[in-house]
Amino acid sequence: MTALIELANVDKTYNQGQVNEVKALKGINLEIEAGSVVCLQGSSGSGKSTLLSIIGCVFPPTSGRAAIAGKQLSRLPDRFLTLHRRASIGFIFQRFNLLPELTVQDNITLPLMPLGVGPRERKERAARLMERLGIGHRAGFPARQISGGELQRVAIARALINDPPIILADEPTAHLDHALSLTFMEIMRELHRDGKTIILTSHDQLITGHPAVERLIGLSDGMLHVP
Amino acid sequence: MNGLSRQLNVIDYSLSSLWRRRFKSISVMVVFAAVIFLLASFQMTTKALTQAASRLLVMAPEITIQKMRAGRQEPIPVAYQKQLAGIFGIRRITPRVWGYYFNETHAANLTVIGVDPRLMPLGEKLASAIDTGRLPGDHEVVLGQGAEELLGGNRIISLFRPDLSLKPLTVVGRFRPATDLLTYDTLFLPPDDARDLFLLPPELATDLCVTVANPSEVDTIAKKIAALLPGTRVLTRGQIEKTYHAVFGWRSGFASVCLLTALTSFIIFAWDKASGLTPEERREIGILKIVGWQTADVILLRFWEGVIVALLSFVAGYTLAYVHVAFFDAGLFRPIMLGWSVLHPRLRLSPGVELSDVLLVLCLTVVPYLAATVVPAWRAAIIRADSALN
Amino acid sequence: MFLNPWSVALCLLSLVVLILLGIASRTAVKVLRHWNPASDSNRQISLENETWLSSTLVQYALGFQLFSLVLFVLAADNFSHVISGAMCAVGSLTANRYGMPALWLKLAGAFLYGLWLVVHHFDISSERYPLLKFKYAALLGLMPLLGADIACQTLYLAGLKPDIITSCCAVVFGEGEGKGGNLMASLPENRTLALFYGLAAVLAVLGHFLFRRRRPSLMWLSGGLWAVFVGLSLAAITSVFSSYVYAMPYHHCPFCLLKPEYGYIGFLIYGALLPAGFFGISAALASLVPAASGLSAVVDRFQRRAVLISCLLLVVFVISVSYHLVLYRLSGGEG
């Protein structure tokens, strides 16, 4: 079985050829199997966000080969990266990145808008997810009015709305208390059981040491190491 | 129809997005509606005045002959008729005696028209325009609604001749209110009485009206008349109408150019509003991009926002302009637009709105606005998706 | 005659299109000089961003150009109230020698901007952007056309002389009111109609085949016939159909159809004919996309859709243009 995510000799250089050139990733070789739960560890500035962006099809690597969910990303124009991203990747962000004025349901269905999914189907798909995550009663509330734990579930629901094979979570528990962090990991474990591939970044002991995490990958100064 | 529902979704989102930033949207809309109001009012006033003039001209003769001396109009000898007898195609020549009578007590101008109804091409029509009474005989007069009110509704009225002697006239009829546009301030009387009122010698008239049998020969006949009668000005109805159009069109064009400065300042304002992105807006676009919106989707979102703002402002501005012109007689502009002496003083403006007028104002306002928001929309749309990651 | 709201609007519209396409061609020059898909430099990233801008700008330009086309005809109709000897738009457009060329150039502009967007659509369907250089070279090629369009329009407006009664005693007359003008010699009615309906039927049948299978030879045949058909239709509208709409046997004018007196039917007629012609012709032109670009699937999908759209619009066009004629003949006209 080939890996779901394959990076070979991946470099990423910002501001290439200029005085403020930054080499964020240097020769990354990484394979992640479908259905695994992986945690990336590293301090800020280690290249963690850059690596997550490449896996998340936000931008292509400067050089090297990157294949995500069967798609070769090297030097792919932005337009096609986006097409691939919205089919394959669900993002969960550190501060959830929800739009506070929009209702819970509208936040969740945001990725479906440019796909041309009609209002009825959007509502049904959101309702199913909200039910499953226990926030069904919050559908019509603006995101700014609900609690931190609920916000987190909204963010998860938005990542899942398009049923992507890969879930990326960037420091998901950094702003959560212990109990909520545990619930988050429980939800991740459940998604893992559904067959999703989950990649987390964190230096929270609770996550790095969580039994659901199958593999830890360390990153420092743009290079991989085994922690 | 995936593309269509994508458009609908983006429109849906742009409506909610405008509503979330309602203060900003409304401030743009108010200013924009004001600019549209100014332009549309001007446009409609011109149009209504031109149309009113055309409607007045329907009653005008096909050819009018005026005598000119030193570049000014003066009474024309009635005997000129005989010189024209040889022109084939002239049906009838009617001398007209007309002018303005200034009523000092009310400081108002009345129009005095002296024509022999039997010689008028539309004589029969005139009889049907009379509400009560009959066509005037000697020393009799028919009044328009306004003239009657002004003169107090007496059976016998007395008017001053230029030498301040009094000229008595018996009122024998009144014009229908429906013909107000043409007759509101008119005194209609036989030509000899009109001459008597203005102390004009019997061999003179104000001008000569020529009726032509075949309308397509008007220009040829007018040319022949001009050749036969040097020292006269020969006006055709078509030409008078075109002059009205040209003069009003010129004024309206001049006004449009002036109003373009207002438009320009609005465009700068709109550009500024569209390019100044708050941190929340930048964050929102970053989120949209990372959850799978294309740059084109964000540009589309901005486009629809622009279209919605523009159309709402347009409808508001245009409707207000219509109300302003139709119900308040374009109170803001009339002093500039009027001043064409032939026009009826109590003209009620009724702007007939055609698709082409709407398109014209649309082009002068909405097009520059949309064009001014393209580049800011694109600038906003290229905010990088990874800005949402940090 | 620039001091007229219609002239002001036309000039403004041209200026806007000029600015939009000017910005787009700046991008075109940059792309042609610096485009390098292998690079991850900031310049390449910003160029990629700018390609979005240029296509958006051309879309706007196309929209405004169509608007300008309609406005130009409406303006001409409005000018006829001012110009001596002009009865309707035909009279104003032929008042000097730049009127009709300006109209044709506007039409050509709208057609080519549309074609550019089709090429753009093909180009961005492939990850390699195979038509990129061609597309931007073509964009630069559109600029002289726009220049000619604006020049003709400006000369046309400058050459219009409004007819104002002068206060001197001599009268200046126009060339007489007879110049309501016909644009062209009238065509033999029955033969024209036979050709028109025959060609429409052939196009419909061809469309039916092409919708199922796109044979290149038939595609070209259809495209060529569409070009002929558009020309023939414009002539037939002018010479035959219009007088049935006006119910005036000697009024042959393709523009008065747009007026409210005739229920704005011209917007329906031209709104169906011109896009139908565009899709009919561009479906054939799409065959020119080289097979090596890897776009054959995209091109094929476009052709299928274009054929469908052109056929549907053909039906709308034929019905709307024949309506008055059929009505006249059914209601006991002399046929």
Image (tube, coloured by chain):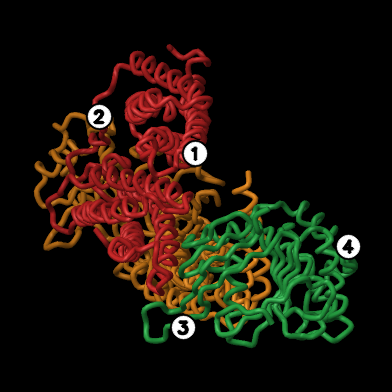
Question: Which badge, 3 or 4, comes first in the chain's sequence?
Answer: 3
Label 1: few (<14), some or many (≥20) within 10 Å? few
**CA–CA distance between discs 4 and 1?**
41 Å
A90 displayed left or right of B119: right
Label 2: few (<14), some or many (≥20) within 10 Å? few
Subunit of mark 3?
A
Q: Are marks 2 and 4 in contact (CB under 8 Å)?
A: no
> Do badges 2 and 3 share one subunit?
no
Question: In this figure, which residue is indicated by the disc labeled 3?
Answer: A22
Amino acid type indicated by mark 3:
Val
Chain B hue? orange
Tell which of A41 and C329 is nearer to you: A41
Chain A hue? green
Question: In this figure, which residue is indicated by the disc labeled 1?
Answer: C297
Of marks 2 and 1, the one in the foreground? 1
Above or below, C165 against C118 in this view is below
Tell which of B39 and B58 is nearer to you: B39
